[in-house]
Amino acid sequence: MRALELVGFDGPASLKLGERPEVEPGPGEARVRLRNTALNHLDVFITRGLPKRPLPAILGSDGAGTVDAVGEGVTHLKPGDEVVLYPIVSCGTCAACRAGQEVHCPKMAILGEHTDGTFQDQLVVPAAICHPKPSHLTWEETAALPLAWLTAWRLLFTRGQLKSSDWVVLVGIGGGVATACLLLGKAHGLHVIATSRDAAKRQRALDLGADAAFPSEAFSKSVQEATGGAGARAVVDTVGPATFDESIRSLAREGMLLTVGATSGPKLELLLPRMWFRHLSLVTSTMGNHSEFRSMLDDVNQHKLRPPVDRVFPLADGGAAFAHLEAGEQFGKVVLSA
Ligand SMILES: [Zn+2]
């Protein structure tokens, strides 16, 4: 069976197609023949050694495919079932797991970051993380869901507690989390403003239902105008240092800066008085719990949401797919095809 292996930490050039033996599923496990997988910035960081994993490693957190074999004791799945994978494996027995808070499990592992991931033809996983594929989606769209849409769901609705008619700004629309926030936000009745340097991306955001889309340059002024001077309840900023100042200026009093990533770098200079005089909060999040994954899938099924797919590459051209994501020109997810 083929696997896209990371053999060094020099970015896309370190990805090579290799061969791995087929693995039999053990008790409680399922083997999934992967149809499509998708890239996340998490994968890109690992190709650059952040963090360094033992090599060779198989990356990939997102996976969709067909159950191929099941181990002993698995009753809710059978060969031929079409599934999408919850991207987290946890111990299942600690206090956090028992409380349904898998993100706080000390043994939590993200597929592809802590264990071998989905960039291969087949993967053996705990059967419990296999969920029915939404029937209205293509395989490519299904593979675009797991990590980005889970992260977006928890960020907006658990951590952010956003409610119908709240204003939210999505900074730098185009990435997986931001486009997921747009579609999930609209499904929940939020008013959504997108920003981008790129006019074509702004138009795509409007086509997907954004209430407004503004150029990145000094976008806080446009947000203040669009909200009648009140500012936004929340700003989702996945860019970081390059946009944080404008994001803070876009917020209403008691507004929240929601952050799940920082594509422009990890370090931030924060003017605290600007935060406290307007009672602002900085709310962070990453990934999500199993129950939140189910809620996200329920929303996708109920509202017939379709994740935008930017481009599909064959597994063998994984390096080119990574280079494409690193260039940052995408709108929606970069997907691999088995
Ligand atoms: Zn646990």
Image (cartoon, grey):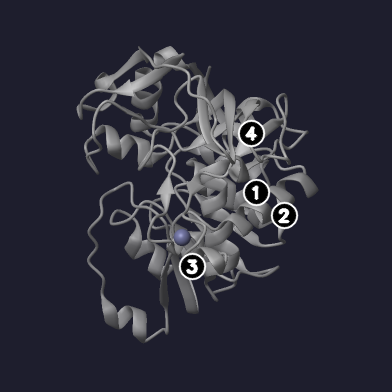
Label 2: state its secondary structure. helix
For badge 4, the amino acid type reads Thr
Image quadrant of residue 70?
top right
Q: Earlier in the sequence, mark 3 or mark 1?
A: 3
Q: Amino acid at mark 1?
A: Leu
Whether 91 is drawn above or below 197: the answer is below
Question: For mark 4, what is the residue?
Answer: 142
**In the image, the residue with mark 3 has its CB under 8 Å from the nearest atom of ligand 1:** yes
Instruction: Verify CB contact (< 8 Å) between mark 3 and mark 1.
Output: no
Task: Find disc 3 in the rendering and name its residue.
Answer: 96
Between disc 4 and disc 1, whose residue precedes?
Answer: 4
Disc ID at residue 187: 2
Q: Residue 136: percent from the left, percent from the top?
A: 77, 33
Picture residue at 67% right of the left edge, 52% below the top: 294
Give whichever of 210, 106 is nearer the camera: 106
Residue 87 seen in render: yes
Q: Residues within 10 Å of mark 3 (few under 14, many from 20)?
A: some
Is 333 above or below relative to 304?
Answer: above
Disc nearest the viewer among 3 and 1? 3
**Distance Cα–Cα, label 3 vs label 2:** 30 Å
The mark nearer the N terminus, 3 or 2, is 3
Amino acid tagged 3: Ala
How far apart are the two marked residues, 2 and 4, measured between alpha carbons? 18 Å
